[in-house]
Image (cartoon, grey):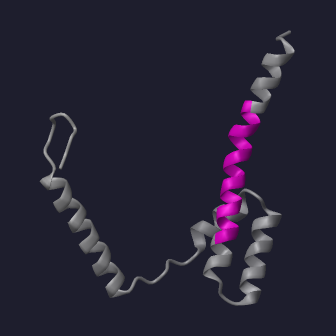
Amino acid sequence: MPPLATSTFLQVLLAMLIIVPVVILWVAAVVDVIRHGGSGLRIAAVLVLILVVPILGPLLYFVFRGREPVSAEDADAAYRADADRHAEAARRPVGGTGVWR
């Protein structure tokens, strides 16, 4: 019989490895539903699905939710930001002491 402290630690560790990701998934789904809005009936129906079916509900929501349309301005801004990031990285020296001006 293993000592009680070891058994309890392993049980808590296993529970945390399951419970914490499920809670994060659940909270992310609820926040995403409220943030993206839509009609009141749609929000209520999706929240009921997420709350009644704790693991499968958020997974189904994230799989079947529609993607947000991206405007041309947003896409252009993202492209310019990525190009600026690449240009900045190209100006930095490779190797050395890590001190960069």
Which residue is at 16% across, 50% downward?
92
How many discs appear? 0
- Tell me where residue 43 sits by quadrant: bottom right
Give the side of residue 70 with respect to residue 15, left or right.
left
Horizontal and vertical percent position of residue 46: 73, 75
Most extreme residue toward the front is 101
Does 75 appear in magenta?
A: no
Residues shaded magenta: 13-31
Q: Position of residue 9 (x, y in %)?
A: 77, 24
Q: Quadrant of residue 50?
A: bottom right
The answer to whether residue 78 is left or right of residue 28 is left
Predominant SS along the magenta part: helix
- The residue at the point 67 percent across, 70 percent down is 31
**Residue closer to the observer: 8 or 86:** 86
* Residue 1 percent location from the top left of the image: 86, 9
Extreme residue in the top direction: 1
The answer to which of 45 and 81 lies nearer the viewer is: 81
In the image, residue 101 above or below residue 73: above
Residue at position x 64%, y 61% from top?
59
Is 52 drawn above or below residue 36 in the view shown?
Answer: above
Q: At 14% across and 54% down in the image, what residue appears?
A: 90
Q: Nearer the viewer, residue 65 or 4?
A: 4
